[in-house]
Amino acid sequence: MKSNAKNRIMMWRSPVVSEVKASATDRRAWITLSREEDQIVMVEFEHVKTLRSGQHIDPDEVLDRRVSRFATLPEAIDALTARGIDTDRFDAPAKVGYPL
């Protein structure tokens, strides 16, 4: 993970986001990492792909939402890397077209 993304999480307590491979071709999938208290929280979800660029989704349009908690950022990065997710793609939500 790039240092600016790590700093967003650890120093500024701001989330970072990456689009990842979805479970179906008609969906988009996202992972967010953020710091809450003394834990790193990873939220994964999908939504239908028909959402137009720049349009936000409503909470009821979120599909397959999963939350995981980690004691440290390196543990979260290791879990993502073990799944083949490129952690260098994580960035500020506005920079990656995050729909929430």
Image (cartoon, rainbow, N blue to C red):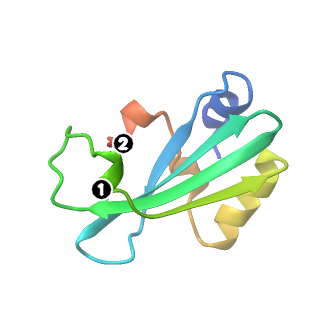
- Which residue is nearer to you in this view: 88 or 99? 99
- Quarter of the image for the C terminus: give it: top left
Q: Position of residue 30 (x, y in %)?
A: 44, 55
Res 5 quadrant in image = top right
Kind of residue at disc 1: Glu
Seen at 26% across and 76% down, the residue is: 25
- Which residue is nearer to you in this view: 69 or 3? 69
Q: Is residue 27 above or below residue 8?
A: below
**For the residues marked 1 and 2, what is the alpha-carbon distance in whole angstroms?**
14 Å
Residue highlighted by disc 2: 98
Q: Would you say 84 lies left or right of 73 here?
A: left
Kind of residue at disc 2: Tyr
Q: Residues within 10 Å of mark 2 (few under 14, many from 20)?
A: many
Residue highlighted by disc 1: 61
Q: Would you say 24 lies left or right of 43 here?
A: left
Res 61 quadrant in image = bottom left
Seen at 63% across and 28% down, the residue is: 8
